[in-house]
Amino acid sequence: MIFDADLRPVVDDVLGANTDTAPGELWALLTELGWPVVGVAEDDGGAGGDLAAVAELAAGVGRHAAAVPLIETGLAAWALAAAGLPITATAERAALALAPTGTVEARRDPAAGDEAGDWVLDGTVPRVRWLPEVPTVVLVVEQADATVVAVLDATAAATAAAAAATAERDLADEPSGTLRLDGVRLPADRVAVAPAGLAGDVLDRVAVLRAAAISGAVERACALTKDHVTTRQQFGRPLSALPAVRQLVAGLAVERDLLDAALTVAVTRPGRGTAAAVRAVAARTAGTVATDTHQLHGAIGITQEYPLHLVTRRLWSWRDDEGTQRRWERLLGDEVVRTGSDEPLWALVTGASV
Amino acid sequence: MADPHDKLRREVRAFVAAAGIVPRNDSWLRGYDPDFTRALGRHGWIGMTWPTEYGGGGRSNTERFVVTEELLRAGAPVTAHWTADRQIGPTILRVGTEGQRAEILPKICRGEVVVGLGLSETEAGSDLAAVRTRATAIDGGWSITGAKVWTTSAHHATHLYILARTGEGASKHEGLTEFLVDADTPGITVRPILDLVGEHHFNEVILDDVHVPDDRVLGTVGAGWKQVTEQLAFERGGVERYLSTYPVLAAMIRTVARHPDRAATERLGELAARLTALRQLGLQLAGALDQGEAPVRLAAGLKLAGTRFEKDVVETARYVLDVCEGDAEAHRLLVDGLAVVPGASIRGGSSEVLYTVISRAELPR
Ligand SMILES: Cc1cc2nc3c(=O)[nH]c(=O)nc-3n(C[C@H](O)[C@H](O)[C@H](O)COP(=O)(O)OP(=O)(O)OC[C@H]3O[C@@H](n4cnc5c(N)ncnc54)[C@H](O)[C@@H]3O)c2cc1C
């Protein structure tokens, strides 16, 4: 899937040539290019660029299995800018923690009065990607009538008695920790109260970018597979001569077409429904592609030395981030049955506004 | 952001609503209604993309796409003109003579032409190039003898498209020629074949020394194979490859809204997500046709995934209508939809053959 034809070759150059570069060095390079803040308006301190550009970067992370929090930092910066906070806190890499309604309590300290008082945070956010390796966490708390956005110092949070980020690693061996907030206090200048809709907008953006990253990993898995079946010989000819192999490869191509199509919709018609749709499709595709590409590789595919696992393990991990396929389908299903007629479905599918 | 086609959509919806349609699944194959077709013609919704000099609308494939998706959404009876509008008109435009264009295209646009597609034979199904129906040159034209089978709508047809052998070549793909024969030509016999639920949609067509003038040859004599494979991009890539069971999907939504159920809602969400992707693929194909491309590989993928979706809609409905207590109308549509499913992944290229088409593009030998 090509989201941004000008950007894509640059992404391949940079991420493709630096797969073994030390994370810190690679990050310095990405920062120099401005990539962590693509998608954030220049007026807000970002590098500008539309959703397609950010999706191209996310797909690049997937295609090259780049072990950098590029997507997460970009999302954190975008959330800060949307809430009217400065994005500088994300410069050295950041994580994004999404707290759905009822999971984190964010309140002003009553002792300090309403005006400039500190904030107090209580609650838990599991599976925050890149925590605690990154120095900053942007926390987005969904409330009934507002979205509270807060900037936390992740290293301090990890050591302070009041808060802890437990280090865990996901299936792709990337950090993904639990953020525990136990009466954490924050000064007022690190917190913003934004409109209620922002939490949903952040989640939509996460969904689309995760799907874009999945599409990148899918593309790589399929490319490796095509390579493998055309070079590996059995029965005196390449695997690609066998009808059953050919059918599986064709099936992969169709799955990819569908994911690309759903991504096109989500990027050109951003919204709650199209984001949930692409996220559900991506989760499904991730599973099918990981299964079939491994099947077609035989035993070599499940070795550490062969690169397939770099993308399939990410597919398995990413597809369950921010909810599994079923969760996104339920969200979309609720949207679709909302009125009892097929109008919401038809509007989702066609983009028709009548 | 307003969709640029909202106005067109509104017009089609108003027209459909006024027609008081009882929705059917597969209404492009099982919904023959010549009056409805002619009314569509009066609105300019047949031959929409063709040049105005031939009675067409001079509009884009994307606009045609919008009209066809609204019609199938409603389960409207569009069989009478579907084949002519979808592939025979475009074929005439691409390879036909000026005389053929001037004579036939305006009639199609008025909804007066019903075409039966005479491709398949008993010994030529997936292996279409094995057709045995033979056209022999005679004075001023051709004599066609042979038998076609599964010819949808032949019993209503004004014209029969016939793929026939006119010569031999090194391969069976050579020596094939396309004809567009007037259905009332002497020597043509149409016999019904009832489908599994006893409905009459397809037929056997016997051609016995049918005399066809030269001006009924479509395109170049002997170039039939190349022409017919291009035609298949039109045949496979349309909205009817994923919307044939849409009325069942709409019935499920009504049902779940009345009797909420979490698992049923999730299933609907899954179908909605897949439909969003399929429809985008369809739109891309329409766009490709506007660019003058014949996207064979993409069309095969759409048909493969689309007919699988149609089947999953019906399978899901069995469950949803059970746990959410579907009403009589919903059950009628489910039963109606079940009859569509087995043929959908066979007609117009069986799924296994489509896998071959796609794998050839993916893994060139
Ligand atoms: C509802 C309906 C309407 C139709 N209308 C028309 C019409 O209007 N005009 C017309 O000409 N035809 C029509 N057809 C016929 C249709 O085009 C043929 O059914 C189709 O081409 C398949 O041919 P067949 O039925 O002879 O199956 P076969 O060719 O005998 O194939 C049977 C099965 O074998 C397998 N198979 C076959 N070849 C391959 C291969 N190369 N690789 C892997 N597997 C393979 C597939 O699973 C296939 O489904 C219609 C069919 C249906 C079901």
Image (cartoon, coloured by chain):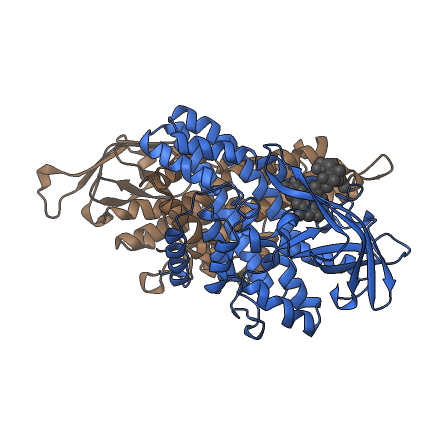
The hue of chain B in the figure is: blue
Q: Residue at x 49, y 55 (%)?
A: B35
Snapshot quadrant of residue B267:
top left
The percent coordinates of residue B135 (x first, y second) are: 83, 57
The percent coordinates of residue A171 (x first, y second) are: 52, 32
| Picture layout, residue B84 above or below residue B146 | below
The percent coordinates of residue B117 (x first, y second) are: 68, 52
Give whichever of A2, B204 is nearer the camera: B204
Residue furthest to the top in view is: B323
| Picture layout, residue B129 above or below residue A311 | below
Chain letter matching colour brown? A
Quadrant of picture, ligand 1:
top right
Give whichever of A107, B189 is nearer the camera: B189
The percent coordinates of residue A80 (x first, y second) are: 31, 51
Q: Quadrant of the C terminus of chain A?
A: bottom left
Q: Residue at x 40, y 24 (%)?
A: B323
Give whichever of B324, A234 is nearer the camera: B324
Residue B232 in the figure: left or right of residue A327: right
